[in-house]
Amino acid sequence: MVKVLFVCLGNICRSPLAEGIFKRMISRAGLEEKIEVASAGTANYHVGELPDPNMRRTASAHGLELTSIGQQLAEGHFSEYDYIIPMDKSNLRNVLDAQPKGTKPEILLLRNFDNKKSGADVFDPYGMNDDGFEKCYKIIEESCQNLMAYLIVEHKLKG
């Protein structure tokens, strides 16, 4: 089982969206028994909350329901997950600072899998208008498609 954890700051916009998109991709590929996905935030601002209403509305417009509950990145995540995927460089620093010695998950920015802007940040749409949330959706969706292709090849996965 390959385990992927998406990470943003509050776990109410970008990382739950990535989790929802990735779950749908896993299902469509018939890989539910081979890939597990979750999300977390580096801060504790929104622990126990549903994703941001604007992000849920944007996802819903794409036929996706976001139901994850906000959680904070914890020490156990580093040994539980094979891949920890932060949304931006600030959260990448936070993840690396929190990583316990002796744990070895692959820690990669999501946009390392973006064909246009490899290594760039996924901007935080929190507080933006609907257009900002839609642009964020498209960036995350494309990057997730490429991450899925990478995992299928890297781990020789078949549905």
Image (cartoon, helix red, strand yellow):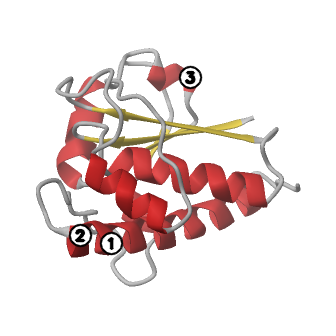
How far from the left and from the top, in percent, is residue 49? 31, 27
Residue closest to the eye, 158 or 39? 39
**Dot 3, how many residues are within 10 Å of its Cα: few (below 14), some (14-19), or many (20+)?**
some
**Residue bearing mark 2:** 130
Q: Amino acid at mark 2?
A: Asp
**Residue bearing mark 1:** 134
Which residue appears farthest toward the right when viewing the image? Answer: 159
Disc 3 is placed on an element classified as: helix
At x 31%, y 37%, the residue is: 11
Tell me if 6 is positioned left or right of 159 in this view: left
How far from the left and from the top, in percent, is residue 92? 27, 45
At x 27%, y 55%, the residue is: 54
At x 71%, y 53%, the residue is: 26
Could you tell me how many numbered marks the image carries?
3
Residue closest to the eye, 33 or 96? 33
Tell me if 4 is positioned left or right of 53 in this view: right
At x 46%, y 67%, the residue is: 61
